[in-house]
Image: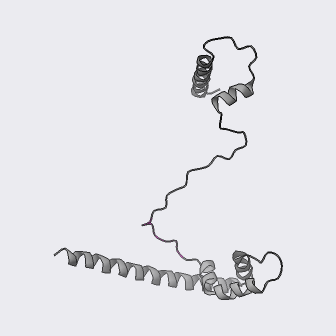
Amino acid sequence: MNTEFASNVYDFTESLFKEFLVEFEGGVVEKCMLEDIMKFHFPDYKPGDKVKGKKKKKDPNAPKRALTGYTYFGKMNKDKINAEIAKADGDTPPKYVAILGKLWSGMSDSDKQKWNKKAAAADAKEKAKEKAEVEVEENAEEGGEE
């Protein structure tokens, strides 16, 4: 057994039982069950509860993800996909991504490559537009200080 781990477990267990003894003022506990100890030290915890992770904060200045051929294809065919969803029968209409995935997987590799190239071109155009907007803002700020 790892000695550092054993030392930490020992210290933790000792502190738990010291608290337990303080609660009972050093008296003798006739019948002590594990459930009683666990309820005493962890009153709000129930085994099987999900542990919630902390949500990461999104950086508002972070650059957007690059468009892929798949996402660009979905953007350009949004009306067609929504029309398919609207005309679908049944209790639960198909989801957007299910139809998009079916259309994308039915395409040939050469068609997918064409969409990838279109996405790269559109992404470059968007980035150039954003860069121009930032430059205009920076120039406006510099001009206002004089």
Residue at image point 60% right, 14% down: 25
Q: Residue 24 falls in which quadrant of the image?
A: top right
129 above or below 57?
below
Colour scheme of the picture:
one colour
Q: Main secondary structure of the magenta part?
A: loop
Circle count: 0
Residue at image point 64% right, 81% down: 74
Q: Is residue 47 left or right of residue 60?
A: right
- Name the quarter where the C terminus is drawn: bottom left
56 above or below 141?
above
Whether residue 33 is in magenta: the answer is no
Q: Residue 100 falls in which quadrant of the image?
A: bottom right
Whether residue 62 is in magenta: the answer is yes
Q: Position of residue 139 (x, y in %)?
A: 26, 78
Q: Position of residue 9 (x, y in %)?
A: 61, 26
Residue at image point 21% right, 77% down: 144
Q: Position of residue 59 (x, y in %)?
A: 45, 62
**Magenta residue span:** 60-66
Residue at image point 74% right, 19% down: 32
